[in-house]
Image: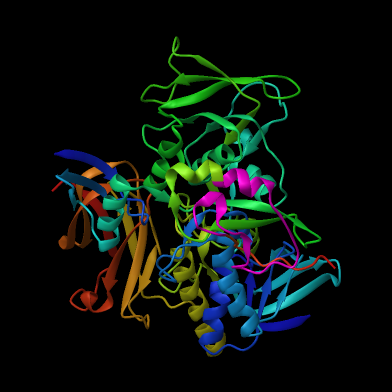
Amino acid sequence: MTEHDIVIIGGGPAGLAAAAAAKKAGTEDILILEREGHLGGILNQCIHNGFGLHTFKEELTGPEYASRYIDMIEKEQIPYKLNTMVLSISSDRVLTVINREEGLIQIKAGAVILAMGCRERPRGALNIPGYRPAGIYSAGTAQRLMNLDGYEVGKEVVILGSGDIGLIMARRMTLEGAKVKVVAELMPYSGGLKRNIVQCLDDYGIPLKLSHTVVEIHGKERVTGVTLAAVDEKRRPVPGTEEYYSCDTLLLSVGLIPENELSKSAGVDLDQITGGPVVNDCLETSISGVFACGNVLHVHDLVDYVSEEAALAGRSAAAYAGSQKEEPSSSNIRIRAVNGVRYTVPQFVNRESEADQWKIRFRVSDVYRDRYISIYYGDERVYHKKKKVLAPGEMEQVAIKKESLEKYPDLAEIVICTEED
Amino acid sequence: MEERELICICCPLGCPMTVRIDNGAVTVTGNSCARGAEYGEKEVLSPTRVVTSTVKVIDGEFAMVPVKTKTDIPKGKIFDCMKEIQKASVHAPVAIGDVIIENCAGTGVSIVAARNVKNHN
């Protein structure tokens, strides 16, 4: 069994930024494990631009953004193994790992950083009845086939779900000559970023039908069409609103799920809402020395925030690996998300933390206009700020200063909520 | 006087903006940064976009290399550029920033590579 101070699972944006930050914080012995043949993760297929405005102050494409971090890893000579799959993690941080060169090996980690990313919700999760013809893809699969492998995915396209990848693919397929007929969204609002609706749909005259879903997929060997219907406020199809669209391709962009099978094998506590680990302000999970960042922790809209979050996980793991502490510290204050705030990350903050302030990221559960974000320490409202627009598709954040807690020595819970006034 | 409602696309904030054109003078409100004001003015006077796509690579470690217009191009020229991009191919190795097509579709803007691609052996 080999040993390393920090082992990072995943060589995508989160893993790379975590590695660079851990190295900068003084940890020499770092190993990145990546199951694909190249570093960079999903960014390599995200060829559109708009990445890096916060991190690099310029607009990059996904592959360019990834290469900035890959260059850092190469320059710092941080070791990585490609085509390498982690099979399980034990609660004392022993990883069982497999690849073609070494076979099945075990690696003991001083600290582990979970950076496995997320995957797409598949057709099977949607309960759309019908045959299983060719031509039904998750949007990310179509993106990979088109952008990495160079295939034409389809000629006449309907997209179900208005997640960002679906919107990006609507534009991409239009540019490549396909006819994207409609994007149908079950909810009364889009799950994607506003800029993507403007740039990917409005620019090309592609209609977005809110409160609509696919009720039938036609075709036996290949998709020949789909039937859309409007849904009521309980998301049930409304009889009589059915509309037939002929198409050879149906793309699904219906949500992303953090990929936490490995976290479960270690016994990490998961948050029911985010689908990712429950973490404290150091991004440490319920298992001592196991940290999480990026889309495995909660699904992000912006890679810049992933990089920032991952750097914190990298610094925390470096501090942990250097300190030999074994018990997670106990003076945790829980952050409770209520009244329109769906979840927060982190879910706990620690008074003894070395940081001066904590960035609390969260999503709201509905579209709100002119609504306040509030923070309560017990009965006292300590933060109250009006936001013009709040939407579930756009992650929000607030900062909590550690010194603001000094007046509340017995505080066990911080509440974050939305308020009408 | 003409008034247009726009959603700013400069960054994910997506500020709702109002652009007023009064005798050729443009005023932007609702933006939260200077880039937003610039975008608002440009979007009503001469809208532009950065176009990204892929080009076939010969003898490369990957089948395709992602490419982009080096700067933004007029919105009306997007499909003319795509026609040229679809016809292009490039021999590996390719480095980020390499010019794949010069002066694409008469825009004066080059198509450049957005990923490093090594030779496949």
Residue A110 at least partly seen: no
Q: In this view, does A325 lie above or below A288?
A: below
Please tell me whether residue A269 belongs to the stretch shown in magenta.
no
- Residue B90 found in image quarter: bottom right
In the rendered picture of this protein, how many numbered marks are placed on residues?
A: 0
Please tell me whether residue B104 belongs to the stretch shown in magenta.
yes
Q: In which quarter of the image is the C terminus of chain B?
A: bottom right
Please provide the residue range marked out in magenta. B81-110
* Residue A252 percent coordinates (x, y): 57, 36
Residue at point 52%, 51% (across, down): B106
Residue at point 45%, 11% (across, down): A239
Quick check: B70 left or right of A381?
Answer: right
Q: Is residue A339 above or below residue B116?
A: above
Pick the front one: A64 or A412: A64
Residue at point 72%, 24% (across, down): A222
Pick the front one: A360 or A74: A74
* Residue A163 percent coordinates (x, y): 48, 42
Q: How are the residues colored?
A: rainbow
Pick the front one: A39 or A355: A39
* Residue B56 percent coordinates (x, y): 72, 53
- Residue A212 found in image quarter: top left
